[in-house]
Amino acid sequence: MSRNATARIAVVTGGSSGIGLATARHLLQRGCRVAVFGQRRTNVESAAEALSRDFGSERVFARAVELAEPAQIEASFQELQNYWGKPEILVCSAGISPKGPDGPTPFEEITLDEWNAVLSVNLTGTLLCCQAAMPGMVAQGFGRIVLVGSIAGRALPKIAGTAYVASKAALAGLARSLVARYAAEGITVNVVAPGRIATEMAGPRDSAVNRAAVARIPAGRLGEPAEVAAVICFLASDEAAYVNGVTIDVNGGEYAPL
């Protein structure tokens, strides 16, 4: 981050676990103040306690936010603005990927409820967060938005269900629209597409699914949340001002669109 990073306010959705929590930690290490939005209250409280212990409670703002509820998104951004001010950095890392004992719901059996539930968080929730943050970014002439996609939205899906794949692929279209509208305002919008990362969503490292993933990944291992967070934090930095409208793959070489 630049010398101005201490003035930066960042929002990280899905920030109470996995890639989101690692990103919150990286941003705090670089001098930002970070608002952590997460779905599960217990996870949010645990993340807030750990981050406050390491970086100071005055630099951490944590709230349980259900991204499928527009009113909660609006209220949380308003509360943050009243507390610190308008955010200049938005990292949309929240996502859900429903699975049963045998994996994702087969395409023929996907219900409209499941489809709508996934898109309401992964895509519509992202849209609403961007809408909430954008006016402040425009007013300040500076903004960094990073959307966390997935290898499943870039290549033929091997594990993920249809709703998840569709929601993550759609983030690229959302990003392009925002770049076209706001690039001249000093705002960048980019996508980071992780591969198989060792998170709660991915399950135990030694599961059959993860062993199969490791066998096909050229790097020969799962990725770590901190490795994705490092890329996100570069895109969120002042130095990344001329990087706009790109998707960066972080997948150990599993998908290499060179």
Image (spheres, rainbow, N blue to C red):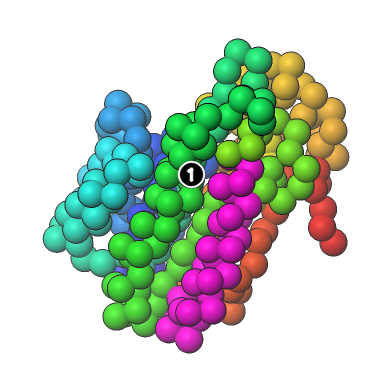
Q: Amino acid at mark 1?
A: Leu
Against 99, residue 187 (above or below) is below
Residue found at the far top of this picture: 101
Q: Element type at marker 1?
A: helix
Residue found at the far bottom of this picture: 184
In the image shown, does 148 or 115 lie closer to the viewer? Answer: 115
Q: Residue at x 67, y 48 (%)?
A: 153
Tell me if I can see residue 64 in this picture. Answer: yes
With 56 as the anchor, is 127 left or right in this view? right
Magenta span contains residue 166: yes
Q: Residue at x 31, y 57 (%)?
A: 33
Tell me if I can see residue 54 in this picture. Answer: no
Residue 107: name its quadrant: top right
With 167 as the anchor, is 83 left or right in this view? left
Tag count: 1
Q: Residue at x 54, y 65 (%)?
A: 175
Local packing at callout 1 (Cα closer than 10 Å; few below 14, some 14-19, many 20+) is: many
Q: Residue at x 40, y 50 (%)?
A: 125
Q: Position of residue 208 (x, y in %)?
A: 74, 16
Against 73, residue 213 (above or below) is above
Residue found at the far left of this picture: 82
Q: Position of residue 71 (x, y in %)?
A: 23, 49
In the image shown, does 96 or 92 lie closer to the viewer? Answer: 96
With 238 as the anchor, is 12 left or right in this view? left
Q: Position of residue 67 (x, y in %)?
A: 35, 44
Against 33, residue 42 (above or below) is above
In the image shown, does 6 or 205 lie closer to the viewer? Answer: 205
Label 1 sits on residue: 119
Magenta span contains residue 184: yes
Per the rendered image, the range of residues in magenta is: 164-192
